[in-house]
Amino acid sequence: MAHTRKRAGATVLGLVAIAAIAFVPATPAQADPSIKDVKARVDRLYHEAEAAQERLHDAELDLADLRSDLSGLEADQDRQDERLEVVRDQASDAVVRQLEGEGISTVGQIVVSEDPGAFLDSLSTMSSFNDLQSSLLTSYDTELEALEIRREATDAREKEIADLTDQLSTDKQTVDDKLAEAKDLLADLEAEERERILASRGSSVRMPSDVPASGRAAAAIQYAMAQVGDAYVYGAAGESAFDCSGLTMRAWAQAGVSLPHSSSAQYGSGPHVAASDLQPGDLVFYYSPISHVGMYIGNGMIVHAANPGAGVTVSGLYSMPYVGAVRPG
């Protein structure tokens, strides 16, 4: 009996041990990303792509300035070439006249000259001419050297910008790849949740029925608000797609104000205003370094080309990291 009870007890303990092992939780698998995580990731990738595009806009503006400088320098060189050619012609004529004098020495010419004083005066004039020629040549050499230095600097800058453009293209491709991955994750979520996150990327505030503005600001706002719902496309400036600085550039162009296609360049395009003094039409800037711009429309709201998910939309003034504001015009 005792032996039987021991066997029974051992059997029970074994079953308990097996049950305990069965209920030990396995190493948890990596959890699927939440809707909040996916949204944050997609938005971050959108902004990385936008920041790269705005840097490219800045590089293109720099290149345009450098090419303009080079054009002016080349025009200076052409004018200097013309001056040098005149000097060369004058010097050539003087040499020919000397040769036609059959090589008579200076002393001999003084002796045979009917007016030695006049001849000596001409020598003085020739000496002054030679001095002038030497001065012009020295000046030309100096300007030519300066031009060559500037051209080398411009060529180096053009290469730098070309390299930057290539790097931005690579960066943009990387972002596109990551964005495609994030969208795949989004597509794997339940349909109802997917619709909710896509809807949340649109305007989260009520569209204003009237924006209090007048004059040029009113014209700019009217244009920007008319684009709400249009697509966001990197580098675009209309007619039906925009990036952030493309929208503000086109909007203020309707008011006769020229702005560069760059958010950071637009930040330096007018007087800065405090957030407490904002007026409809003011440009508002975000992130550090600056890589996004929108237009203030009053009541704590802005209109802007947000990202490829939201397009041109209306958002809160502080929906992104706020940096400052500028009043165009």
Image (spheres, helix red, strand yellow):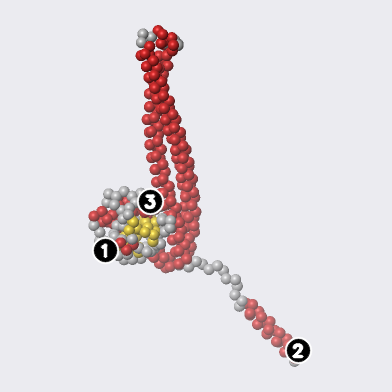
Badge 3: how crowded within 10 Å, few (<14), some, or many (20+)?
A: some
Q: Is residue 150 above or below residue 5?
A: above
Residue 84 placement: quadrant? top left
Residue 97 vs residue 171, the one in the foreground: 97
* Dot placed on the residue nearer the N-terminal end, 1 or 3: 1
Query: Residue 117: in sight, yes or no?
Result: yes
Q: Foreground: 189 or 159?
A: 159
Local SS, label 2: helix
Distance of label 1 from label 3 (alpha carbons): 31 Å
Q: Is residue 240 visible?
A: no
Do callouts 2 and 3 mark residues in contact (Cβ within 8 Å)?
Answer: no
Task: Tell me which amino acid carries mark 1.
Answer: Ser
Q: Which quadrant, please, contains the N terminus?
A: bottom right
Numbered badge on residue 238: none
Rendered residue at 31%/57% (across/down): 282
Question: Residue 3 shows which numbered tag?
Answer: 2
What amino acid is labelled 3 in the image? Ala
User: Looking at this view, is 311 or 325 the one in front?
Assistant: 325
Residue 23, image quadrant: bottom right
Residue type indicated by callout 2: His
- Badge 1 marks a residue whose secondary structure is loop
Which sits earlier in the primary sequence, circle 1 or circle 2? 2
Residue ID for mark 3:
265
* Residue ID for mark 1: 209
- Compared with residue 295, is residue 108 higher up or lower down, i.e. above or below? above
Give the residue displayed 65% in from the left and 82% down from the top.
Answer: 16
